[in-house]
């Protein structure tokens, strides 16, 4: 995937101006070939830990993955560069360009696998709405459920 290729070149495909001083720049050629994998994150606060390779965004997080037509909002987002995994938490809303949407408390997006796992607040459920057509593959989402005893 393009994200992995960009990480191997020593740069990030995340458009995080605040973090530009922490990470090396990607060459123009690698940038052009990786445009489909570009993920943009906007938030109130962003930090990066070079030791762990974890980028954390918090407060009014808005994530855009243009290559997949995906926009997500949450309270916090963490990008685990070693695992190529993004975890959104707190009032997560995910909307795709084709109108598909999902609401959960926690949303884990496994970039390499193109797979997502949505988890609810304990005692609640994950909400999703899909507009499927015969030629459109459905995103592989695994919703975790909790049992409520009354």
Image (spheres, rainbow, N blue to C red):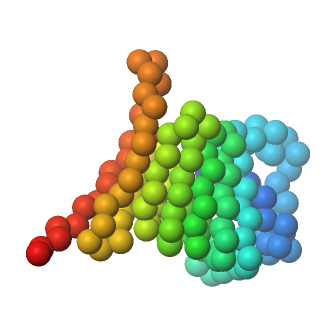
* Of residues 46 and 49, the one drawn nearer to the viewer in this rendering: 46
Measuring from the top left, give residue 20's x and y in whole percent: 84, 69
Which quadrant does the C terminus fall into? bottom left
User: Farthest left residue?
Assistant: 150
Residue 9 in view (yes/no)? yes
User: Is 126 located above or below residue 114 in the figure?
Assistant: below
Locate residue 145: give its quadrant. Answer: bottom left
* 136 sits to left or right of 53: left
User: Farthest front residue?
Assistant: 150
Measuring from the top left, give residue 119's x and y in whole percent: 36, 63
Locate residue 137: give its quadrant. Answer: top left
* Of residues 84 and 94, the one drawn nearer to the viewer in this rendering: 94
User: Farthest top residue?
Assistant: 134
Which quadrant does the N terminus fall into? top right
Locate residue 13: give its quadrant. Answer: bottom right
* 85 sits to left or right of 36: left
Residue sitting at 74 percent across and 76 percent down? Answer: 44
Residue sitting at 40 percent across and 48 percent down? Answer: 128
* Of residues 53 and 98, the one drawn nearer to the viewer in this rendering: 98
* 61 sits to left or right of 96: right
Residue 6 in view (yes/no)? no
Residue sitting at 44 percent across and 22 percent down? Answer: 133
Measuring from the top left, give residue 107's x and y in whole percent: 46, 61
Measuring from the top left, give residue 16's x and y in whole percent: 78, 65
Q: How many marks?
A: 0
User: Is 117 located above or below residue 148 in the figure?
Assistant: above
């Amino acid at each position: 995937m393009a994200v992995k290729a960009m990480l191997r070149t020593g740069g990030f495909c995340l458009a995080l101006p605040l973090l530009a001083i922490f990470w090396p720049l990607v060459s123009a050629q690698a940038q052009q070939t990786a445009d489909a994998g570009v993920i943009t994150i906007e938030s109130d606060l962003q930090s990066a830990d070079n030791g762990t390779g974890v980028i954390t965004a918090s407060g009014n997080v808005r994530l855009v993955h243009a290559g997949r037509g995906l926009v997500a909002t949450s309270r916090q987002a963490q990008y685990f560069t070693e695992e190529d995994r993004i975890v959104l938490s707190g009032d997560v809303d995910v909307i795709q360009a084709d109108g598909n949407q999902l609401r959960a408390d926690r949303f884990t997006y496994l970039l390499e696998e193109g797979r997502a796992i949505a988890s609810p607040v304990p005692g609640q459920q994950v909400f999703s709405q899909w507009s499927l057509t015969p030629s459109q593959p459905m995103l592989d989402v695994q919703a975790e459920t909790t049992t409520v005893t009354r």
